[in-house]
Amino acid sequence: MTHRIRVVGLCGGIGAGKSTVATLLAERGATVIDVDAIGRQVLADDDVHAAVVAEFGNGVLDADGAVDRKALAIEVFASEGRLADLEAISHPAINRELDRHLTQLADPTESAGTLLVILDMAVLVESDLGRLPNGRGYREVVVVEADLEIRLARLVDRGMTVEDASARMAAQADDAKRRAVADHVVVNNGDEVELAAEVDRLFQQLTSDPVTSGARPVPDRCTPGD
Ligand code: ATP
């Protein structure tokens, strides 16, 4: 028997509740892949490490020779175009790793049926992450939204300063851009009980309704391979 897998991209502005929704979906039986964590892991890959050093210099390495993400972030946000330079190195590596995970999940297993796979990713709208050739990447998108003041309050509760939280929000795609690619929207302005009910509804849709994939332009870059 082989699993069919239904791959869903999950995104949301910082503080909207994306990670909380991912956890609630996992509790209901979804397989969640933390794409941001893969992004951190690939920095240790030999080829990515070498390319980062060639592009950004030895100044982004720590005393042990590993990529220091804070030092790299300073370089990346120091001038325009540098984030794209980093993504040109890291995104193909992340997508290759994702492809490997998804291929493993689709391997023959004891049980048949459709496996719901959630790609938990901060950067979706802005990038080609999770868009794999031959339709193996995500085919539909869930966007978690919350009002700006509520997001700010949650982030401050989590220990962030208002300035830091506001700067991070400003650096991300805005709600309108995210909504434009959304097939499903979770509004998280209420308490955790209300969110759990929303996620129940979403899980039901994702496990029983046909794929509701909106028209979405194919990205310029599609990695790995073709
Ligand atoms: P990031 O991009 O930083 O990972 P995120 O969008 O994934 O942010 P979460 O980490 O899920 O956001 O949520 C931000 C904070 O708000 C967390 O501390 C979380 O526990 C809290 N939170 C999320 N949803 C709710 C809710 N409905 N009621 C109360 N607190 C919430």
Image (cartoon, helix red, strand yellow):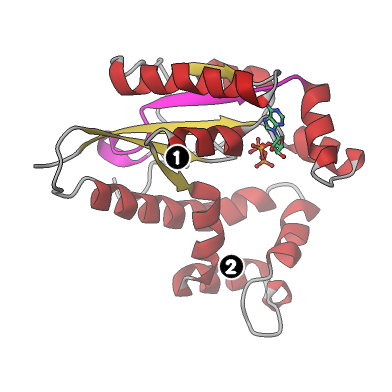
Q: Residue at x 84, y 45 (%)?
A: 160
Percent x, y of residue 200: 46, 21
Percent x, y of residue 53: 61, 73
Between 69 and 200, the one lying in front of the other is 200
SS at mark 2 in the image: helix
* Quadrant in the rendering for residue 218: top left
Q: Is residue 212 left or right of residue 41?
A: left
Cβ of disc 1 within 8 Å of ligand 1?
no
Q: Residue furthest left?
A: 1
Q: Quadrant of the C terminus?
A: top left
Q: Is residue 194 left or right of residue 166?
A: left
The answer to whether residue 219 is above or below residue 194 is below
SS at mark 1 in the image: strand
- Looking at the rendered structure, the kind of residue marked 1 is Leu
Q: Residue at x 79, y 24 (%)?
A: 150
- Indicate which disc residue 52 carries: 2
Read off the magenta span: 132-147
